[in-house]
Amino acid sequence: MANGFAGKILRIDLTAGSSKVEPLSDTILRRYLGGGLLGAYFLLRETPPGLDPYDPANPLMFMTSAMNGTPLSGANRYSAVAKSPLTGGFGESEAGGYFGPALKNAGFDGLIITGRAQRPVYLLVYDGQCEFRDAGRYWGRLSHEVQDGIEDELGDKRVVVLQTGVAGEKRVRFAAIVHNLKHWHGRCGLGAVMASKNLKAVAVGGKHRPQPADPETQKAVMQWFKESYDRKKDQMHLYGTARGVGMLQASGILPTRNFRDGAFDDFEKLTGQTMADTILTKRGTCYACAVACKREVAVPELGVDPKFGGPEYETIAATGSLNGVGDLKKIALANQLMSQYVLDSISTGVVVGFALEAYEKGLLTKDDVGFELEYGNPDVMVRLVEMIGKRDGVGDLLAEGVARAAKKLGPEAEAFALHVRGQELPMHEPRGKKSLAIAYATSPTGADHMEAPHDPIYEGFYAGKHALAPLGLIEPVDMLDLGPKKVRAFTYAQKLWSVYNVVGMCDFVGVPIGKLELEPLVRYFNSVTGWDMSLWEMAKAAERSSALFRLYNHREGLGTAHDTLPQRMFEPLEKGALKGHRIDPDQFQTALRDYYEMMGWDRATGLPTRAKLAELELDWAAEWV
């Protein structure tokens, strides 16, 4: 058995109230590695087509990788996987924090949870054992009450508590999962899947510690990173993910007024610098990470507590500029409410923006809502967030997500429902970062901004662009280009970030955004496992993940017709430096087909060819072509 892995997963049947340990072979681990790829392997093999996401047979999985629990910055990402109630397709949401390492400490590489408990339960997974505990007193409680209650009950604050919230219990389709109140599986509605199983929380911990196969090489890479990284000069450390608000504003691509505009007059009130100067109390971090990009904020007059962390860029833009809100304190309050109810902040903000535009166009009225809606009103935004978390009033409609809400309101509403496959758009503008048009349209989970590095990387904006030279990416490509060179750059860089997914590396620590270069990453991974894996072999594992995700969605009825963008993306921006810019539909379709071919997929069907599946050792999945 390779080092780094526990070599086993824990299968939990909530209906039967039982669990069993299942070994994982070296062959399976080397081929599927971990994260979303290992989850997709089980999801495609073990579930029938057409399964309702809330069916007890829909497995909820948490999958780590070899580097989880090791002391390298950024090496502790893991994935939650299930069929998504938001999209009806492949659902995956990564998280950092501490749960992945704690699961390794408990003695497992992953959890596969099926069934539905007769009454609310939580699981204690500790040192190779699984205990079912009553969670009736935690059902209907806010996240901090659950966190505090389970910690007090167990008498051990080192145990990591992962939970779904009130939003999940009420089956808000974009309900999230959170651990330690501030580390998120935000996307795909997996919190609703968790709650549908009457599973309130999973508490993990133990004394198992991963041991590297080659401690000296591990130490050498750690020393190299220590000497190469200076967080005093790192904007990500200093200002968090909101460090780039000003750049987005200047470029005309800061999502504003439900993506009608690319500039927001009050943008300076929303920057990472403003947060650092006003409400920031601490720079939080994930397991063993020196970057510390997380934020912790306090607003005493609004009851905002730093134990809930602080808003990331996505939250700031989704609840802020998208809705015309320039009040960072009220955004921090909304962020806390989303943590308490456990809601995805991206989808929540976009749903609020949809409601504001629907009201503006007369598709929602004061009688429907109970009060007036308007852009730029922070109290309206905060009130809608809480109504969504409770499914109260118009919040019941909005809790379905923009795709379903728009269908109920009619064709006019569908024209400004910002989603792909039912999942709301992140806060990055495809009309100004053209590779995102491909990323959003083809992402297996619906619109996702973490498919690959964004276009400034390819243009040469970041000094780290040369770190992608091992991939053959050495020629700059303009941000607004959507020709074959851009498609090639995106396709190659997407493979890199897929590598990060399967090995558990954070995109903000690895190149081109962070400092960890490809050669040290490969050396470190092999120092942990004892393998001699090359970057090429890792890239092939990444291709496996793309192929399996694609096949799963095709099996569930999500084909090339769903590889599209919201109508608004084909309309010109109304304000900002890129006023008048849009995505050309014909150019988009050509880029899409070029992407299929560069991936080894059929240009017409968008599916991996049988030859590609054979190359990737996925012959068993060919029945879904």
Image (cartoon, rainbow, N blue to C red):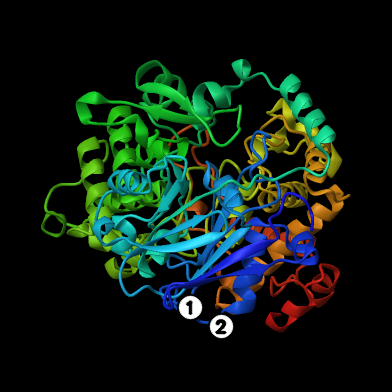
Q: Quadrant of the C terminus?
A: bottom right
Residue 430 can be seen in this image: no
Q: Residue at x 69, y 67 (%)?
A: 23
Report the Cα–Cα distance between label 1 and label 2. 9 Å
**Mark 1: few/some/many CA within 10 Å (<14, 14-19, 20+):** some
Mark 2 sits on what residue?
48
Identify residue type, mark 1.
Answer: Ala
Residue 294: % across, % down: 49, 32
Q: Find out whether the residues at labels 1 and 2 contact each other: C-beta distance under 8 Å.
A: yes
For the N terminus, the quadrant is bottom right
Which residue in the protein does label 1 denote? 57
Crowd around label 2: few <14 · some 14–19 · many ≥20 (10 Å):
few
**Residue 315: percent from the left, percent from the top?**
41, 40
Q: Is residue 197 above or below residue 274?
A: below
Question: In which quadrant of the rendered view does residue 165 lie?
Answer: bottom left
Q: Nearer the viewer, mark 1 or mark 2?
A: 1
Which is more toward the observer, 101 or 352?
101
Amino acid type, mark 2: Pro
